[in-house]
Image (spheres, rainbow, N blue to C red):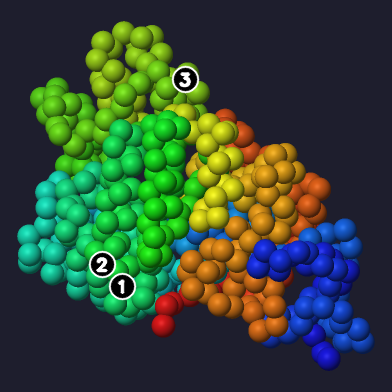
């Protein structure tokens, strides 16, 4: 037997949940050709994995790397954790179809002027991603916000029949181009006007194509359980497979239990969920503004906030994102406001003597828009470790980053998105080594085989003959995260080697410079 790569003497944890076993892994032409004792084979490259786990590449079922992979396709933060596939287009956010180029950036995480929006439809975006040559594999859902922004615009109302028909055409064209399904972010201002019937009609299109519907539900605080019930009801009416995004709400243990109970009670439906690994929620400060106030980009936002009359209109708008406790909302470090980093909005408000806390918020945004051009980020506590432990052991839960890929150098070096550098490494360290709530085999299954099953990817997420050669070699004793809440941009440790489609992407803990990721289009 002649092989491109032979990984010998490792403990193979194949992603299925089966017990790990001492075995060799042979790779040729981008696929696994054998898992087991491999003796006498000729190999161009041999790795001794003694004392290491050999696993499938990890799948980030909830990523927002739609745009950052275009700006820096190395996916450094992900590859160093063993991630080889990212599912983008989540929470209704994403990069296609683009009907209104001025409004589109509202629903694109990490948008920057250095990478123009040069495409319009899903096919154009996929071709642009292929040209970027990402280091990881990518598949995308169709983001609902872009359908609405390109059809209805910056308004918070239900769609007319003609508008719904236009959104349906955009969805169908995107699915024809190879999108994997459809996502919504009904809590966000761009989608708050959507009715349950609108979503149901769009989901029926997805169901006919066999796609997946992923939803960031309509309410994540009070009413969170009712919002989960709506998602399940919508999926049942449409006959579509359902993935509930970051299921646990921000409204406490009881509401969280109720949300899980609703999923468990959805008998006869194909329902599962994912969950990020942070104990806090993350949000751009500007998302607290009503959607109409975001029209025109940074310059126009600044003009509105500087005008007393328009500022009052923003305050009185129904579209203002509700915040129950400003003392729990913390501003992260920024160039515009270095003196206020890591402090609560309530504390900043008192120090400034602004009176109305919204004036403090608007002043923070105004200075950032007119000086550094930064997008300010806020965090607030939303979950407890008890909730994390309960949700991650659930058989229907897959962990996800809920973040963008980033890098410690290059065009994304100054960008921050909590979870980017830590999610998979944290999950393994915490759930396997620290709490021992999951075995290595169960944790790897949740990171690989289970999300592959949800996506109906039969040749990824597993190590077996014929599977795509997305392979990770890691040290189970040291694999873990280094990033923290206020110093998040730290590469994880413990991953020795990563193959993506049979190509060395990480070798001895260092990026090789080879990028062999593929844009996966649903047939």
- Spatial CA distance of label 1 from label 3 is 46 Å
Bin the neighbour count of mark 3 within 10 Å (Cα to Cα): few under 14, some 14-19, many 20 and up: some
Give the mark nearest the N terminus, 1 or 3: 1
| Residue 467 visible to the viewer | yes
Residue 452: x and y in percent read: 54, 68
Q: Nearer the viewer, mark 1 or mark 3?
A: 1
Q: Is residue 228 left or right of residue 139?
A: left
The C terminus: image quadrant: bottom left
Give the mark nearest the N terminus, 3 or 2: 2
On residue 238, which mark appears?
A: 2
Q: Is residue 177 left or right of residue 513?
A: left
Give the mark nearest the N terminus, 1 or 2: 1
- Reading the image, the residue beneath label 3 is 343
Secondary structure category for the residue under label 2: helix
The N terminus: image quadrant: bottom right
Secondary structure category for the residue under label 3: strand
Secondary structure category for the residue under label 1: helix
- Spatial CA distance of label 3 from label 2 is 45 Å
Dividing the picture into quadrants, the one containing residue 220 is top left
Q: Nearer the viewer, mark 3 or mark 2?
A: 2
Dividing the picture into quadrants, the one containing residue 422 is top right
| Residue 65 visible to the viewer | no
- Spatial CA distance of label 1 from label 2 is 7 Å
- Residue positioned 80% across, 54% down in the render: 475
Check contact, mark 1 vs mark 2: CB within 8 A: yes
Q: Is residue 405 left or right of residue 213?
A: right
Check contact, mark 3 vs mark 2: CB within 8 A: no
- Reading the image, the residue beneath label 1 is 207
> In the image shown, does 404 or 113 lie closer to the viewer?
404
- Residue positioned 36% across, 76% down in the render: 210
- In the image, residue 160 sits, relative to residue 35, either above or below, namely above
């Amino acid at each position: 037997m002649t092989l491109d790569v032979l990984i010998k003497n490792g403990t193979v944890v194949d992603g299925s949940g089966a017990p790990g076993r001492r075995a060799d892994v042979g790779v040729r032409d981008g696929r696994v050709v054998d898992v087991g004792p491999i003796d006498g084979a000729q190999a161009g490259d041999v790795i001794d994995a003694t004392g290491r786990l050999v696993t499938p590449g990890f799948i980030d079922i909830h990523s927002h790397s739609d745009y950052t992979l275009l700006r820096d396709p190395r996916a450094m933060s992900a590859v160093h954790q063993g991630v080889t596939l990212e599912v983008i287009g989540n929470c209704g956010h994403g990069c296609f179809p683009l009907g209104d180029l001025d409004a589109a950036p509202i629903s694109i995480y990490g948008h920057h002027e250095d990478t123009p929006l040069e495409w319009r439809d899903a096919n154009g975006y996929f071709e642009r991603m292929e040209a970027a040559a990402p280091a990881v594999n990518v598949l995308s859902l169709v983001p609902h916000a872009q359908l609405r922004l390109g059809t209805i615009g910056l308004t918070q109302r239900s769609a007319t029949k003609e508008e719904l028909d236009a959104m349906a055409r955009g969805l169908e064209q995107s699915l024809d181009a190879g999108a994997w399904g459809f996502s919504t972010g009904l809590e966000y201002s761009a989608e708050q006007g959507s009715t349950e019937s609108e979503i149901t009609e769009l989901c029926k299109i997805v169901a006919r194509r066999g796609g997946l519907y992923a939803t960031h539900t309509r309410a994540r605080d009070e009413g969170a359980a009712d919002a989960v019930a709506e998602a399940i009801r919508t999926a049942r009416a449409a006959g579509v497979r359902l993935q509930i995004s970051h299921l646990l709400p921000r409204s406490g243990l009881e509401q969280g239990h109720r949300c899980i109970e609703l999923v468990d009670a959805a008998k006869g439906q194909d329902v599962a969920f994912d969950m990020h690994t942070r104990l806090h929620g993350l949000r751009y400060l500007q998302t607290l503004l009503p959607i109409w106030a975001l029209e025109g980009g940074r310059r126009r936002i600044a003009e509105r906030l500087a005008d007393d009359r328009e500022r009052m209109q923003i305050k009185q708008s129904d579209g203002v994102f509700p915040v129950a406790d400003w003392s729990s909302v913390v501003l992260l470090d920024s160039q515009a406001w270095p003196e206020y980093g890591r402090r609560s909005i309530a504390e900043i408000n008192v120090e400034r003597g602004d009176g109305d806390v919204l004036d403090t918020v608007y002043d923070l945004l105004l200075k950032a828009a007119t000086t550094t051009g930064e997008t300010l980020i806020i965090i607030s506590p939303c979950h407890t470790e008890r909730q994390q432990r309960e949700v991650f052991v659930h058989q229907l839960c897959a962990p996800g980053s809920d973040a963008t890929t980033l890098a410690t150098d290059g065009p994304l070096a100054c960008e921050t998105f909590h979870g980017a550098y830590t999610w998979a490494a944290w999950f393994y360290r915490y759930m396997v080594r620290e709490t021992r709530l999951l075995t290595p085999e169960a944790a790897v299954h949740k990171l690989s085989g289970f999300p592959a099953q949800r996506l109906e990817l039969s040749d990824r997420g597993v190590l077996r003959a014929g599977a795509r050669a997305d392979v990770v070699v890691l040290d189970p004793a040291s694999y873990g995260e280094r990033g923290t809440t206020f110093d998040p941009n730290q590469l994880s440790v413990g991953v020795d080697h990563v193959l993506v489609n049979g190509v060395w992407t990480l070798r001895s803990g260092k990026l090789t410079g080879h990028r062999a990721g593929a844009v996966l289009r649903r047939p």
